[in-house]
Structure formats: C-alpha cells, structure tokens
Amino acid sequence: MVDYKQIGLVNTRDMFAKAVGGGYAIPAFNFNNLEQMQAIIMAAVETKSPVILQISKGARNYANQTLLRYMAEGAVQYAKELGCAHPEIVLHLDHGDSFELCKSCIEMGFSSVMIDGSALPYDENVALTRRVVDYAHQYDVTVEGELGVLAGVEDEVSAAESHYTKPEEVIDFVTKTGVDSLAISIGTSHGAYKFTPEQCTKDPETGRLLPPPLAFDVLEAIEKKLPGFPIVLHGSSSVPQEDVDTINAYGGNLKAAVGIPEEQLRKAAKSAVCKINIDSDSRLAMTAAVRKTLAEKPAEFDPRKYLGPARDHMKELYIHKIVNVLGSDGKLAQ
Ligand code: G3H
Ligand code: 13P
Ligand code: ZN
C-alpha cells in the first residue's frame, strides 16, 4: 500500500472547499504521456494553480499504470524543481468502472478516485459508489461519484444519449454514498463532437457552429439541494477552432467538431462547479502542433523536434484554461 501523502500528493477535500467558496474551479487534465504531464505541471507552476492529474482506464492501458503512477510522483518533484515549494497535485482515477479498479489505484498511491456508476440503475450506482467510498475513506482518499449520463464516445467512455441529472435524486445519492464530489450531466459530453450540426445554430458572421447552452437551470436546482457541495463537470473541452483549422489545414479531417463555449464554463466555474475535466482540447493542441511541424519540416525525424512544439502548445492551452476560464491561478495555499 502506497501512502499518497508520503509521495507529496494531496486529496481533493480542502482544494474543493476553497474552490467552491472562492468561485473558481480546479483544472482536471487527463494525461497519457510525458509531454502532456510536463506541460500540465509547467502551466500549474507558472500560474500558481492547484491541479488534478487524471488517468483514465484507457490511459492505464496505453501507458502502463505503474509508470503513470511514478510519473505523478515525479510530477511533485518536478514542480518543486520548477520553483513551487508546496505544489498541490491530486492523482485521480478518471471514470473508474469497478470496485477492483478503484481499490488497485488506491493501493498504488492515487489520492482520489472516480467511481462512474452513472450507466447503472440508480440503486446499483448507490451500492457500488458506497462500497468504493467505504474503502477509499479508510485511506483518506476522496471519491467522485456520478449521477446522470453524458453523451459522447471515447475509447472507454460511451453513451448514445445524455440524460440530465435529476435534482430530486442528488440529496439521497450524496447521503447514501458519502461521496466527496458529484459529477453531473447538464449538457456537456465527451470528445470533440459534442453536438450534431442539427443541434447547433450557425454564426452568421463566421459560419461557425454555435452549440446550445448548458442546462444552468438544472445546475442551479442541484446547488439549491446541496448548498456548497462540490460539483464536477466532465466533457468540458471547448474544441478551439484554431486547432481544428490547423489540423484540417495540414492533412487532418475533423469536420463539424464543436465544444462548450468558454464563457459558459467561466460561468460554471463561478458556481458550485469546482472541478472541470479537460482532455480533448489537449489532444487537439498536440495533434495540431505535430501536424504543423511535420508538414512544415518534412525532413525532421527527431521526435523531440515535433513533440517539443506540441508540449509548448499544450502548455499555452493549459495556462489559458487556468487563467481565463477556471480562475484557479494564484490559488496555491503558500
Ligand atoms: O472522459 C474521458 C476521457 O477523455 C478519457 O478518454 O478513455 O479515451 O482515455 P479515454
Ligand atoms: P472532454 O472530452 O470534453 O475533454 O472531457 C474530458 C473528460 O470528461 C474526462 O473525464
Ligand atoms: Zn469524463
């Protein structure tokens, strides 16, 4: 059993309490490789922001769970080397789908886990989530549960349709499970195609697709039921059109990719939403930079020459999110 506190990680409890009270959200960035991890830590240190490094089941399969966990331990030391004396870094399991997976991550040194029982019937979701909470809390590991279903398709996360969280269920769920935070569904979804063109309107000036607004009425109803309780938004990439354009200009084929407008995420971050999950935007930034470099420098074959610019571009993206969208800059305790 690895004690996450011994390796310099923190759980989400204090971080979320401060974020809810302070009207900002903590960034939860997925990572699968060295360059993403470096860019996240550089951005968090430069902006003096707490940060959640999250690992999906897909990431564990891709990069090896042991390696990723040691990278997170390395991330703490790396942040210190970059000049941050007291980094606040959470290592979080994203979309855990079984008790066994959550337990294994807790034993490896994760400081936070998500148990995603949102696709299960309500009572089964409650029972599974309660079991994970009972185990996790013995080690002071915090747990995120989910109610409501997000649409979207990713390697390990998929649902055809979204179902908004029912505000009338949240008190019962939180009370029965003992979760530390609750992921809800209010119209966000995973991936780079969050809405069909039919669901969008067209901006007459730019011709870009404008997505429908998030269900802030549902969020407000949930906040009323659970005042001050930490709420999590998944599927919160904005799908920057400049990166989509760069990808398409250099041989890619991303048609009608559309995300959540940043002003809506800014509004959410000021509410009880205290964790905002972003993965697809980092994938787009990395792909855009790699495609551009390889197209402009066809003789290049040293991976550092194209992954370096990709890392720089992701770092810019993370800084932008922290400072201009989530507002978590300057929020480190010391
Ligand atoms: O919410 C899903 C994350 O973007 C992780 O995606 O399962 O393809 O690693 P993944
Ligand atoms: P995006 O696909 O919008 O980046 O969402 C990521 C996410 O929710 C990870 O859990
Ligand atoms: Zn998610």
Image (tube, rainbow, N blue to C red):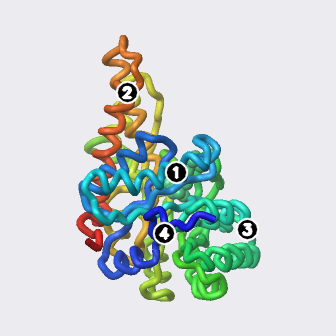
Q: Whole-Å distance between the Cαs marked 2 and 1?
A: 22 Å
- Residue placed at 31% from the left, 32% from the top? 309
Q: Whole-Å distance between the Cαs marked 3 and 4?
A: 33 Å
Callout 4, which amino acid?
Lys
- Disc nearer the start of the sequence (1/3): 1
CB under 8 Å between callouts 1 and 3?
no
Q: Whole-Å distance between the Cαs marked 1 and 3?
A: 32 Å
Compared with 118, 242 (above or below) is above
- Disc nearer the start of the sequence (4/1): 4
Q: Whole-Å distance between the Cαs marked 4 and 2?
A: 33 Å
The quadrant of the picture showing ligand 3 is: bottom right
In the displayed structure image, the side of residue 59 where residue 130 appears, left or right: right
Residue 70 tag number: 1
Foreground residue, 1 or 233? 1
Instruction: Please tell me how crowded label 2 is: few (under 14), some (14-19), or many (20+) other residues with Cα within 10 Å.
Output: few
- Disc nearer the start of the sequence (3/4): 4
User: Dot 3 corresponds to which residue?
Assistant: 120
- Residue placed at 57% from the left, 70% from the top? 164
